[in-house]
Image (spheres, grey):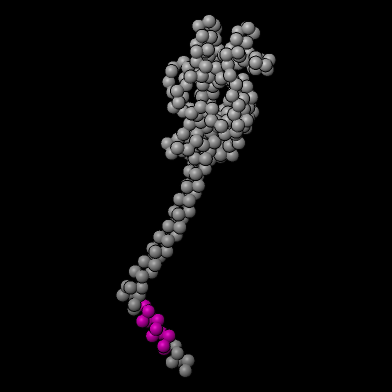
Amino acid sequence: MNHDILHQLKQTSLFSGLTDDALASIAEKASTRKLAKNDVLMRKGETGDSLFLIHDGWVKIVTEDSRGEELIINKCGPGETIGEMALLDRSPRSATVIALEDAEVLEIKQDVFEQLLDQRPDVSLGIIRSYSNRLRFSTTYIERAIDWAQMIAEGDYSFIDQSQPLLKNTGSDDDKATQLLSAFFTMVRKVKEREEGLKQQLEKLTFEIDQARRKQEFEEITSTEFYSKLKAQAKALRARRAQESD
């Protein structure tokens, strides 16, 4: 295992407190996996028997909405760990992980991880830190989605201009949440387009109703006895004027 990977292990919140010897021991028992862009590292529902440290490249963590469309819930890059949740609660994978680009990950099997927890209880602190960071981001993610949902309810779509492409590097949690809510932006655009379409249909329908109403009012007026008499009087007047001119 090269020094670059040992350094990467030491930079993670999970293993930052371990000695070089302990890190070397983990590295010896771990294996590397190379991913090409769009390769699937793990799938939602699978049994999880290992965690992964991202050594190089970026991955996206996705699930599906009710229509089976991809919903990006996070993205991770060098130095971040993924997949440890399944090792702790022994439940199936909660999401699918797909490479955003060519990537390399370090795989640590469950038995190695459990042995590490037995020998080094301080690793549990790293797990807590990792979950704390994810919880903070999830809070930001949810807050942003709620704020925008309230704006939609008020007919305000100005935030659509904030949508950003999914980039590797982001600044704050707010920036990251904005990028990852791409599915939300897509939904909002469709809502706005549908709303504009309904407005156009309503305007067209209103115009047609007005035309029909004017036609009905005209027919009601022209069918009255008063109008018939007025029409006859006008005809007689035109005839009399024609005779006088002759």
Helix, strand or loop: magenta stretch: helix
Seen from this angle, which residue lies furthest left? 225
Which is more toward the observer, 151 or 114? 114
Residue 20 position, x and y percent, is 64, 8
Seen from this angle, which residue lies furthest bottom? 246
| Left or right, residue 155 beside residue 101 | left
| Left or right, residue 104 beside residue 239 | right
Residue 88 position, x and y percent, is 46, 15
Which is more toward the observer, 238 or 187? 187
Which is more toward the observer, 151 or 60? 60
Magenta stretch holds residue 95: no
* 22, above or below 93, in the image: above
At x 45%, y 35%, the residue is 65
Residue 151 visible in the shown view: no
At x 42%, y 61%, the residue is 208
Residue 7 position, x and y percent, is 66, 15
Seen from this angle, which residue lies furthest right? 3
Magenta-tinted stretch: 230-240
Residue 159 position, x and y percent, is 56, 37
At x 51%, y 31%, the residue is 62
Residue 103 visible in the shown view: yes
* 134, above or below 212, in the image: above
Determine the image quadrant of residue 89. Answer: top left
Which is more toward the observer, 222 or 232? 222
Callout count: 0
Quadrant of the image containing the N terminus: top right
At x 50%, y 11%, the residue is 114
